Amino acid sequence: MANAVFTKGDGNKGTLSFDVPVDVYEKGIDLAFQDVKKDVSAPGFRKGHMPKQIFMQMYGEESLYNEGLNKVLPEVFDAAVAETGIQMVGQPQIALDSMEKGQPWKISAEVELAPEIELGDYKGLEVPAADVTVSDEDVDAQLKQQQEDQAELVLVEEPAKDGDTVVIDFDGSVDGVHFDGGQADNYSLELGSGSFIPGFEEQLVGAKADDKVDVNVKFPEEYQAEDLAGKDALFEVTVHEVKSKEVPELDDEFAKDVDENVDSLDELKAKIKENLTEQKAEAARDAKEDAAINKAVDNASVIGGDVPASMINEDVERQMNQFFASMQQQGITPDLYFQITNSSADDLRKQYAEGAERRVKTNLVLEAIVKAEDIKPSADEIAAEVKSLADQYGMEEDAVRNALSEDMLAHDIAIKSVVDEIVDSAVEK
């Protein structure tokens, strides 16, 4: 269709030359005319109703060439890429070589290709063996956490101690001047939680209900409010209540309160052990996968140098877009996120840039293994993947196929197959 030819240049760069057939760019010109005729008029015709023939006489077909090309270029360019089989990265630099009426338009594009990968060993790799044993101490720790979760706060008359919760009023000042955010009434504070300025909670240990305590602290040098950072402060504190945690006894009744599907503490312990065993096994599988994939990537090399900067930049932008899409589902806009975290888009970009080169190289290595193994998912495998995704997201299978092309589905299946092969063949030592 595009009569495409790729000529390799220096390194990973080259030139992709292709044609835009006459019938294709004529369709683009028609589409361009439909857009521009809304804003032009001619004597005897209402605005937006000028016939195409009149427009051509007044302005010439050439006036629509650029916009017409823009209408069809993405489709023709993709066809040229597919025709030559190149794996392009980054944005192409388009040049218009020839746009003669009645002749195919000649286009060339300076493009950058994904680098080739020289694979090393990726099967039978040795990886550290993970400990999946669940001890009695592990079960007891889980029980203790559940016991803490079921604890209730009860009023006590004894002096407050670490772990107790005090209900307080406080009013803070620096050099006798009260500052914004330094006051609160009936605030519940768990002593020892570390949620207040260092030294604050410790000075309330030993206080009783109705006590008034002067708490002297120093704001940290790196405190977020610059006008308070490093300064000495006085908090006048009134203690209203002292509450202590009352934890339930570890018995059969406790077990039934925690899990309605068990009848005794022994059954609860057995269930906890089973769940922890499954969690450790899953974590071990993840650790084995990470170790095996990392080793396969370390054993491979990028032919001709480093991963192209364009691929790294694309990965960073993709990671950021995915992150913001996730935040958007929670009702958090980018501006709100940056406000909450006191950060910026540049900060987030730097965060994702740290692992970008490794992520890109990992993808290149996995795709190189797919090519080396000549993995081509069957129609049945693609159908099974569509069904799995439809069930997972509660969608119709046709909706999944409309959202994801067959090539995308086949690519994902092939990558999963490679990962499974690397991990299943790895030897734990």
Image (spheres, rainbow, N blue to C red):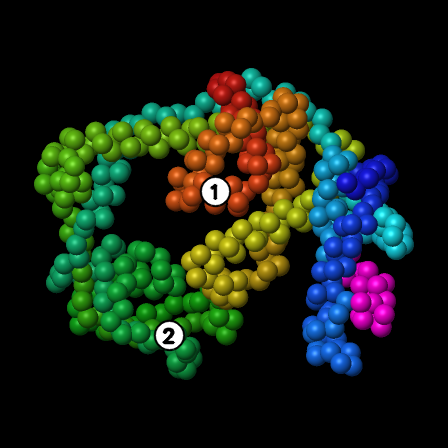
**Along the line of sight, which residue is nearer the eye, 130 or 51?**
51
Quadrant containing the N terminus in the rendered view: top right
64 is within the stretch colored magenta: yes
> Is the residue 206 above or below the residue 129 in the image?
below
Residue 272 in the image, given as x and y percentages of width and height: 24, 33
Residue at screen point 17% across, 54% down:
152
Packing grade of label 1 (10 A; few <14, some 14-19, many >=20) is: few
The answer to whether one can see residue 124 in this image is: yes
Residue beneath label 1, please? 398
Residue at screen point 78% across, 55% down:
26
Predominant SS of the magenta segment: helix
Task: Name the side, left or right, on which 189 lies relative to 39.
Answer: left
Residue 402 in the image, given as x and y percentages of width and height: 53, 45
> Dot 1: what SS?
helix
Mark toward the viewer: 1 or 2: 1
> Is the residue 329 above or below the residue 118 in the image?
below
Residue beneath label 2, please? 182
Report the amino acid beneath label 2: Gly
383 is within the stretch colored magenta: no
> Is the residue 67 above or below the residue 371 in the image?
below
- Magenta stretch? 53-70
